[in-house]
Amino acid sequence: RVERVMVRPIRVLGTGAFLPGEPVPPERVEEVLGRIPGLAPRFAARAERIGAEVLDRGGVRARHYALDPVTRAQTETNVSMMEKAVRAALSAADVEPGSIDLLITSGPMSDYACPSTSALLQGRLGVESLTEIEIHSNCTGAPKGVQIALDMLRVGRYRRAAVVYSQLSSAFLRAEFFNPAKVGLEHLALRWMMSDGAGAIVL
């Protein structure tokens, strides 16, 4: 005999996003991230040609970086971008941070090994008590976080959740972090595809 499990319907209450800095068109990506000095001339010419093709075919009109192109200083952290995205989602949902009892963060890298990004974000949101979970993942971290939130909300374990994903690619794509003698096209490919930002959803 198969028993049916009752699940609660879940609604999207609001979404939000944060993109740091001014929009950067494809032709300025290398300028903002910095050109890698000391590349062999033939390799540099080939890389520039392939990079231009990737940027053109990608269809992305502008990218954003949490990086001051003049001072080379990082202008945001994963947690600061997440906070702005979550607050935008909460505003769109017209609910207060304190109404969230489940907070899920995800992304390919954290600001610190400890404490967790989710705990740091909880502190910035000023929520005294909730369940916070951090997922270490690549781009699939966004749907993974949503799936976990949906499952927990459907069975009634929690009432309201915020899920946020952050990408801070400029932290490792800056020219000063590359060794010209060891750079290959596979390393440069990420510079032509990735950028910074955060997105959030309230369920």
Image: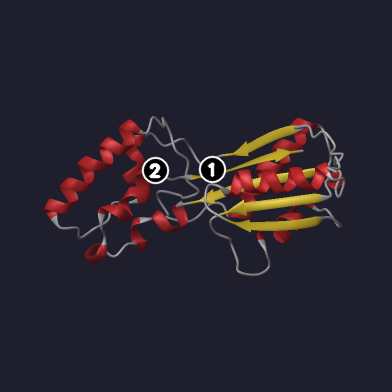
Q: Amino acid at mark 2?
A: Met
Q: Give x and y (percent) for residue 92.
A: 74, 31
Res 8 → quadrant: top right
Q: Give x and y (percent) for residue 187.
A: 32, 55
Q: Which residue is mark 1?
A: 20
Q: Nearer the viewer, residue 51 or 160?
A: 160
Give the numbered dot on residue 193.
2
184 over 95 or under it: above or below: below
Q: Residue furthest bottom?
A: 114
Q: Residue at x 85, y 42 (%)?
A: 5
Foreground mark, 2 or 1, reads 2
Q: Secondary structure at mark 1?
A: loop
Q: Residue furthest left?
A: 42
Q: Residue at x 15, y 58 (%)?
A: 40
Q: Amino acid at mark 1?
A: Pro
Q: Give x and y (percent) for residue 34.
A: 33, 51
Res 97 → quadrant: top right
Res 134 → quadrant: bottom right
- Badge 2 crowding class, 10 Å Cα cut-off, few under 14, some 14 to 19, many 20 or more, is some
Q: Give x and y (percent) for residue 129.
A: 86, 57
User: Which mark is first along the chain, 1 or 2?
Assistant: 1
